Image (cartoon, grey):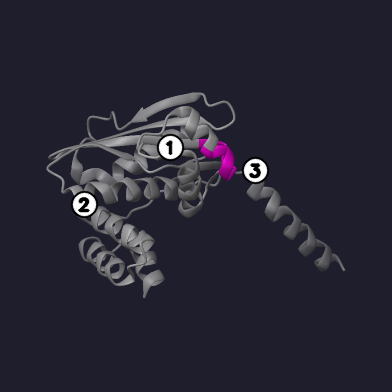
């Protein structure tokens, strides 16, 4: 009887704990300038970098990221035809549609071997921009550090909102792996499983410990 009661209480507590997590919608990040970066790679990174950001926010014990497909559907409903840039007011509407408390939007700039990631944190309830954040650390400015840059900016978002950090990860992921994985995501979204698998495998060849690439390859095989 006691064991059954404890089991019931555990089941009840699980959804409550999930509700207590802060929810995020991460929108595709705009490629503002891409000098020295292939246009197809820049387009794919808009999706890939946003997904990496969402994954990192999800890894925090206090954070939960809305699935990309759900967010993309909401963007399609709210974004006027022909416009690529999302303002804070539209971001807030998207956040309300998907049930997110905060929306992350922004852009990235690639200038040959330099890389800049700029994001804004929008309160979905009020439309207020809480904070603008970027990789302003002088030691994190290189394109080769793309993966670490995304993780560092995600850590700043969590800190800004008073949420616990994501667990440390010892994985080393190259920029080439991030680009190949991002191309794989685009191909998977388009239903091209063969291209997605090849791109995920390419990412793993470059960075064997890239967890997202392993998961992607398992999905499309």
Q: Residue furthest bottom?
A: 221
Mark 2–mark 1 distance (CA, rounded to whole Å): 23 Å
Mark 3–mark 2 distance (CA, rounded to whole Å): 39 Å
Give the crowd class for mark 2: few <14, some 14-19, many >=20 residues within 10 Å.
Answer: few
Quadrant where the C terminus is found in the figure: bottom left
Q: Is-magenta flag for residue 159?
A: no
The first of marks 3 and 2 along the sequence is 3
Does 36 appear above or below 214?
above
- Relative image position of residue 217 (x, y in whole percent): 35, 69
Look at mark 3 in the image and give the residue it sits on. Answer: 20
Q: Is residue 110 left or right of residue 64?
A: left
Helix, strand or loop for disc 2: helix
- Relative image position of residue 5 (x, y in whole percent): 83, 63
Look at mark 1 in the image and give the residue it sits on. Answer: 80
Residue closest to the eye, 11 or 201:
201
- Relative image position of residue 170 (x, y in whole percent): 33, 53
Quadrant where the N terminus is found in the figure: bottom right
Does 13 appear above or below 216?
above
Residue depicted at x 24% and y 53%:
179
- Residues in magenta? 94-102
Helix, strand or loop for disc 1: loop
Residue depicted at x 27% and y 30%:
137
Q: Is residue 125 left or right of residue 217?
A: right
Is residue 163 something that shows in the picture? no
- Relative image position of residue 18 (x, y in whole percent): 64, 50
Helix, strand or loop for disc 3: helix
The first of marks 1 and 3 along the sequence is 3
Residue depicted at x 77% and y 64%:
7
Give the crowd class for mark 3: few <14, some 14-19, many >=20 residues within 10 Å.
Answer: few
The first of marks 2 and 1 along the sequence is 2
Mark 1–mark 3 distance (CA, rounded to whole Å): 33 Å
Look at mark 2 in the image and give the residue it sits on. Answer: 40
């Amino acid at each position: 009887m006691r064991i059954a009661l404890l089991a019931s209480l555990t089941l009840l507590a699980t959804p409550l704990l999930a509700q207590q997590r802060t929810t995020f919608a991460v929108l595709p990040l705009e490629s503002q300038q891409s000098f020295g970066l292939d246009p197809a790679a820049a387009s794919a990174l808009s999706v890939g970098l946003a997904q990496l950001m969402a994954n990192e926010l999800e890894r925090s014990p206090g954070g939960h990221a809305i699935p990309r497909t759900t967010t993309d559907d909401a963007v399609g409903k709210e974004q006027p035809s022909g416009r690529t840039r999302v303002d804070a007011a539209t971001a807030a509407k998207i956040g309300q549609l998907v049930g997110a408390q905060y929306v992350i939007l922004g852009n990235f700039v690639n200038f040959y071997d330099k890389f800049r990631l700029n994001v804004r944190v929008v309160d979905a309830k009020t439309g207020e921009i809480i904070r603008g954040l970027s990789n302003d650390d002088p030691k994190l400015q290189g394109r080769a550090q793309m993966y670490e840059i995304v993780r560092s900016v995600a850590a700043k978002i969590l800190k800004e909102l008073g949420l616990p950090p994501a667990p440390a990860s010892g994985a080393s992921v190259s920029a080439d792996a991030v680009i190949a994985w991002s191309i794989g995501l685009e191909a998977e979204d388009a239903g091209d499983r063969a291209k997605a698998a090849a791109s995920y495998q390419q990412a793993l060849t470059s960075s064997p410990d890239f967890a997202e690439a392993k998961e992607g390859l398992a999905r499309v095989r």
